[in-house]
Every structure is written in C-alpha cells, then in structure tokens.
C-alpha cells in the first residue's frame, strides 16, 4: 500500500516549509483568510512559494473568494491547487476550475451521517474532497480549529474522487484515524503548532512519521 500523503496547512515561514518538505509532506497549504491566525497575504505567499521544491503541491485555501481576489492570487503565486473552504456551491466549484485551470479541492464539514450526501454531490465537480468536522454555528472560521470528531462516520467510505481527512489530527491520533477510516491522505494545521499560527518543527516531523508508519 502506498504511503499516506500528508498536507501541512497554514504555513507562514520558510523554515517550516523546509521542515515539512524534508519530512515528506506531499502538499503545503497557504491560508488566505484574514480571521485566521495562519493568514498570509498574496505577496507573502508569492515569496514563500519560491521555497517549495518541485514535486510538493502548493495549495491555496480560500473562503468564498471573489474572481477579483483569485485573479490576483493566480497572477502572483505559482499554485498547484485551490482549496475552497467556504460555502461555495457546486456551480461555483465548476466556475473556478474552468476559469483557472487548476485542480480544486472542496472542503466538506460533517456533523452527522446526513451530511455525507454533500461528498457525493461535490465529487461530481471537484478534483478532491477534504472531509472535516462541521464548524460550530458561532465560529467565525471555516476550519483550523483543531476540533476532534467521530471518524466512524467516514469509516471505509469509497467516493469517486480522492479524499483527505482533516480535523483534530495530531501525531498521537493520526495512525488511529487512518486505520479507522482508510484515509490515504490527511491534513493537519493546529495539530503541528506550538501556538495558533506558529508551526513546531518537531511536531511536523512526528506527525508525518506517524501518518506514514
């Protein structure tokens, strides 16, 4: 069985990018959402993208972004994938894919089995799906809160697109999460931080090692 592919999200400095790449990350995520402690500007991301070696996918996490913002983002930052993390409709996902010609990953929040139908719906238009816990109604952020959830809801599910497991993962539980769900891709942000938005080199290494053990 191939190695589990790991995405380290919310990167904000060149040193953490180097650590993640050296440890074997397959994807690096840059967050463009001002309310997040991991937010970066387009110019900051453009500089950080230059630190990423070939073969590691650069992913932009955006939330209900306008064409104007995405036009500037695409013009300045060499990206490999767009991650839509807001309330984008299937029609909007299709628009973004067609306008920019990049693979699109759509994040889907799950709080009960009744939410799973969305995965089949968005799998018709997105290239990948990110499955995570649905955020509380009073949350002002669409993700990255480190919330744990019941992985059994996606246990051994097989969808028509590659999917990625996220939410509350860290070095101590990622192997269990992979074993329970059968996920071949995992995403982590707060689980490899020493403080909100501050990546920890040892936690990054430990997470990737645990995911691929």
Image (tube, rainbow, N blue to C red):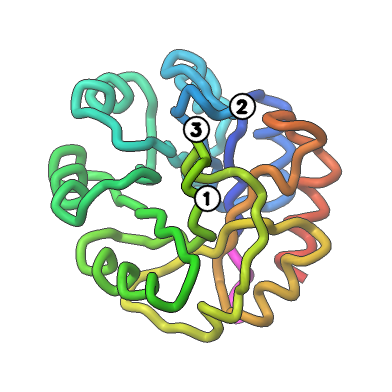
In the image, 122: left or right of 170? left
Q: Main secondary structure of the magenta part?
A: loop
Q: Mark 1 sits on what residue?
A: 136
The quadrant in which residue 19 appears is top right
The location of residue 90, given as percent across then percent down, is 19, 56
Which badge, 1 or 3, comes first in the chain's sequence?
A: 3
The location of residue 55, given as percent across then percent down, is 51, 47
Check if residue 177 falls in the magenta segment.
Answer: no
Q: Residues within 10 Å of mark 3 (few under 14, many from 20)?
A: many
Range of magenta residues = 1-5
Check if residue 2 falls in the magenta segment.
Answer: yes
Q: Is residue 69 above or below residue 59?
A: above
Assess whether mark 2 and mark 1 are in contact (beta carbons under 8 angstroms): no
Residue, x 31% and y 75% (percent of image)? 117
Q: Residues within 10 Å of mark 2 (few under 14, many from 20)?
A: some
**Closer to us: 177 or 73:** 177
The location of residue 51, given as percent across then percent down, is 58, 27
Q: Mark 3 sits on what residue?
A: 31
Element type at mark 3 = strand
Residue, x 68% and y 81% (percent of image)? 179
Q: CA distance from mark 1 to mark 2?
A: 18 Å
């Amino acid at each position: 069985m191939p190695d589990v592919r790991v995405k380290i999200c919310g990167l904000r400095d060149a040193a953490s990018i180097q650590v993640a790449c050296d440890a074997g990350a397959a994807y690096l995520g840059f967050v463009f959402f001002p309310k997040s402690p991991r937010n970066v500007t387009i110019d900051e991301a453009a500089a950080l993208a230059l630190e990423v070696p070939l073969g590691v996918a650069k992913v932009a996490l955006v939330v209900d972004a306008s064409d104007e913002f995405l036009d500037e983002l695409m013009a300045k930052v060499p990206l490999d994938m767009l991650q839509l993390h807001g309330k984008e409709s299937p029609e909007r996902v299709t628009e973004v894919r067609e306008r920019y010609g990049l693979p699109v990953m759509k994040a889907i929040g799950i709080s009960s089995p009744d939410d799973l139908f969305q995965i089949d719906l968005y799998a018709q238009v997105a290239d990948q799906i990110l499955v995570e816990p649905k955020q509380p109604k009073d949350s002002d952020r669409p993700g990255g809160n480190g919330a744990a959830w019941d992985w059994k809801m996606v246990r051994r599910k097989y969808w028509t697109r590659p999917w990625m497991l996220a939410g509350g993962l860290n070095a101590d539980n990622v192997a269990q999460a992979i074993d329970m769900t059968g996920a071949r891709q995992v995403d982590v942000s707060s689980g490899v931080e020493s403080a909100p938005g501050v990546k920890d080199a040892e936690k990054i290494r430990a997470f990737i090692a645990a995911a691929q053990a």
